[in-house]
Amino acid sequence: MKQNSTGRTEQINQVDCSEQRIFFWVPFLRQLYVCTVCSSIFFMLGLCFGAPMVFIPQLRKNSNSTNEPLTDDMASWLTSVLGYCSIPWVIILPILAQHIGRKIPFLIVTVVTLVSFIVFYCSTSPMHLLISEILQGVTLASNMTILIVIIVEYSSPRHRGVFLTIESSIFYWGVWIANVTGTFSHWRNIAIIAFVCCLYSLTAIIMPESPSWLAMNGRFEECAKAHRWLKGRHKESEDELESLIKSQKEYRKKCAARLKTTSWYNRHRIIKETMSAKGFYQPLLLSLSLVSLYHFSGKLVCTMYAVDLITSITASESAAYTGMLILDAVTILGMQIGCVLSKVINRRTLLLSSSVIGIFFLFFISLYLYLVSLKFIEENEIISIVLLTSFSVAITCGPMIMPTIIFGELIFLRYKCSSLLIITLFSELLMASVLKLSPHIFKALTLHGAFLFYGTSASIFAFILYKYLPETKDKTLQEIENYFKESHETEEDEMFINEKTNDHIAQKC
């Protein structure tokens, strides 16, 4: 009998171990599914950015056989209009995400993106392509308003960093695939790839609503169900769920108490004082600095104007196209290296060290081009491409992939809608303006002056982040929030006490 009971105990233990393995892998695979659904949108955004780099040269070659030739002004708009046309969606998407959840806005983004690529495929003139680019503004706007929010809220702390870095690298896979497709075939074939991605993104209809959004709206039972579906029932997951629900219950009680006891004037004052609170403005300013570091590093400019830039340096069109594909491939390689390093190295360390290396190469390229302009040394195609690829690897390992990870973690849940609205508006305006003005910067400052400008600008923002940016690796969103929260809660409590005192005095009067 003892042997039988011992055998049964061993069988039960084996079953428990196998169930634990299943319970570990099933939530991970579900989170991975959500990540890949978002990745398809990031990939299509890369296709949107890469397409003008190949269809503009093709349209210029065929301009004699078309009724509507491509002008330089139209070409510049086809390159930069994406950023400007994302601005209305930057306002619309966070509002939708705040009121109806994360899932439905994501499906809206997918459908509009599908329509834009249908227009792209059927285009017969530059104006049709411009309409397609205008529609694709929603794809760009979703980058920092919906996609990052979904990945941050749907993934566990241990997987979140890797998922976010993968999203950033997927974007440049899209750019590279668009360039390769347009270089070796007709540019319309880019749309066929996008159709497949859109169909996969539409499967998001089966995924649950965000647990964080459900908790924020007081739907705690649905929150627990969605959280356990995504992250399982192990101790870390349950602790995270308990912390999330507790935090949101306290916040909802505080908000309800204020609505009952405060006047319209005091509510208006609360909004003003909240905007000046450390928990709101400090993560926001750090996020804006992260975005500025990326755009002022000049990496996106070098990608979008790769052919023109390398042609100006090497005076060889064949070297320019070869260099473009090499830069795209090296960018992808650098981002994969960054994904691996982000799992091992602290986020802050990786961001700042790679930024310093990238800035060094910006100054070195500036010096090299200045010496070439003085004819002190002769220009060498190999050296030029090696310097640009070294700069590209450094920037892709940090300033390119880290901002989306870090500011996705820094922003408080209660401020996510308003903060992401400000960050995304700032980012899209800055990106579009930098892309639009870069040709003028190259003409006014010449190439060596332009690289000096980008190196100096990036140095300023890197110093700000060195001084104020906290570490966020392997921390829950609640732990990150607590870093900023102590003084913020003190301000809120003082505000609440003052409001109750003022209302009490008013009632006596």
Image (tube, helix red, strand yellow):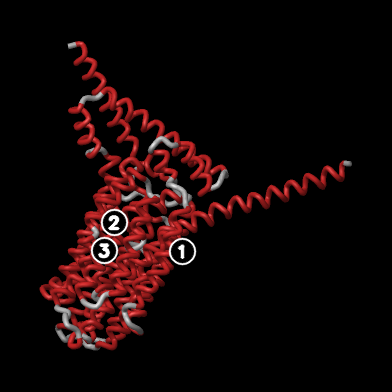
Which amino acid is tagged 1?
Val
Determine which residue is flagged by label 2: 290
Q: Residue furthest top?
A: 508
Which of disc 2 and disc 3 is earlier in sequence? Answer: 3
Residue 340 disc label: 1
Which of disc 3 and disc 1 is earlier in sequence? Answer: 3
- Residue 338 quadrant: bottom left
Which amino acid is tagged 3?
Leu
Q: Quadrant of the C terminus?
A: top left
Q: Does residue 437 appear anywhere in the picture?
A: yes
- Give the label, 3 or 2, closer to the camera: 3
How far across and down, in percent of the image, does residue 409 sit? Answer: 37, 49
**Pick the front one: 381 or 50:** 50
**Pick the front one: 19 or 125:** 125
Does residue 200 lie above or below 24 as drawn? below
Does residue 309 lie above or below 11 as drawn? below
How far across and down, in percent of the image, does residue 382 sit? Answer: 31, 85
CA gap between label 3 and label 2 equals: 27 Å
Residue 135 disc label: 3
Which of disc 1 and disc 2 is earlier in sequence? Answer: 2
- Residue 347 quadrant: bottom left
Q: Quadrant of the N terminus?
A: top right
CA neighbours of label 1 inside 10 A, class few (<14), some (14 to 19), many (20+): some
Does residue 309 lie above or below 273 as drawn? below
